[in-house]
Amino acid sequence: MILPMLEVKNYDDSVKFYTEKLGFTSVMSMKGPDGQNIFGFVALGGSQIGLGHDPKPNVTLSKDRGNGVVLMIYPDDFDIDAYCEKVKANGVPLVEELKTEYWGDRVFSVKDPDGFYLTFGKTVQTVPPDEIQAHMSQQPQP
C-alpha cells in the first residue's frame, strides 16, 4: 500500500475542501502543541490521503509543493459521472473535463488549494496493453 501524505498550508482549510467540496470523510485529526489541528486523514471509498501542516515558524514551505504531483484516485464501486456533477455543483473548477481515455478509464481532474492535481477515475473497459501502446506511439512528443 502507498499512502500519500500532502504537506498543506492550512490543515483545517484543506480538510474543509476535501470533505465539503469533494465528499471525502475526515477519518481522524491530531492537534499540535498549540491545540490547532495539524495532521490527519481523509478518505473517499477505499482511498485515503494524509494531510499535514508543520506549524513551526522557521519551516519554509515550497510555493510549488503541488507541482508535478498527480494523485490518481479510484474509489471502490463508484459512479464517476454522478460524482463529477456533484464536485462541479460544489463549485470546484475542473482542470480536465470528464472523459473516457484510450486506456479504458473514465476520468476528470481538479486541483486542491495547495496545487495538488487530483484525477478521479473509474475503469469502464479493459483495453489490451498493445492497443494502449499503439495509441501512445502515435502521440506527438512534447
Image (cartoon, rainbow, N blue to C red):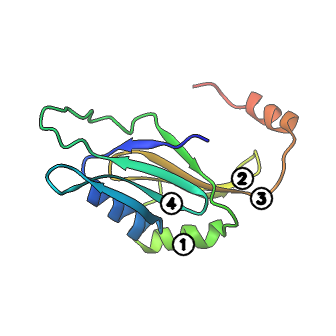
Q: Quadrant of the N terminus?
A: top right
- The residue closer to the viewer here, 77 or 118, is 77
Q: Position of residue 93 (x, y in %)?
A: 42, 61
- The residue closer to the viewer here, 121 or 133, is 121
**Residue lying furthest front:** 33
Q: Earlier in the sequence, mark 4 or mark 1?
A: 4
Q: Marks 3 and 2: CB-CB under 8 Å?
A: yes
Q: Position of residue 54 (x, y in %)?
A: 24, 41
Give the number of callouts.
4
Q: Quadrant of the C terminus?
A: top right
**Residue 107 visible here:** yes
Mark number for residue 43? 4
Q: Earlier in the sequence, mark 3 or mark 2?
A: 2
Amino acid carrying mark 4 in the image? Ala
Mark number for residue 85? 1
Distance, label 2 to label 4, CA atoms, is 21 Å
- The residue closer to the viewer here, 50 or 14, is 50
Q: Earlier in the sequence, mark 1 or mark 3?
A: 1
Which residue is located at x 56 percent, y 67 percent?
A: 84
Residue at numbered disc 2: 105
Question: Are there few (<14), some (14-19), or many (20+) residues within 10 Å of tag 2?
Answer: some
Distance, label 3 to label 4, CA atoms, is 22 Å
Amino acid carrying mark 2 in the image? Asp
Question: Are there few (<14), some (14-19), or many (20+) residues within 10 Å of tag 3?
Answer: some
Q: Earlier in the sequence, mark 1 or mark 2?
A: 1
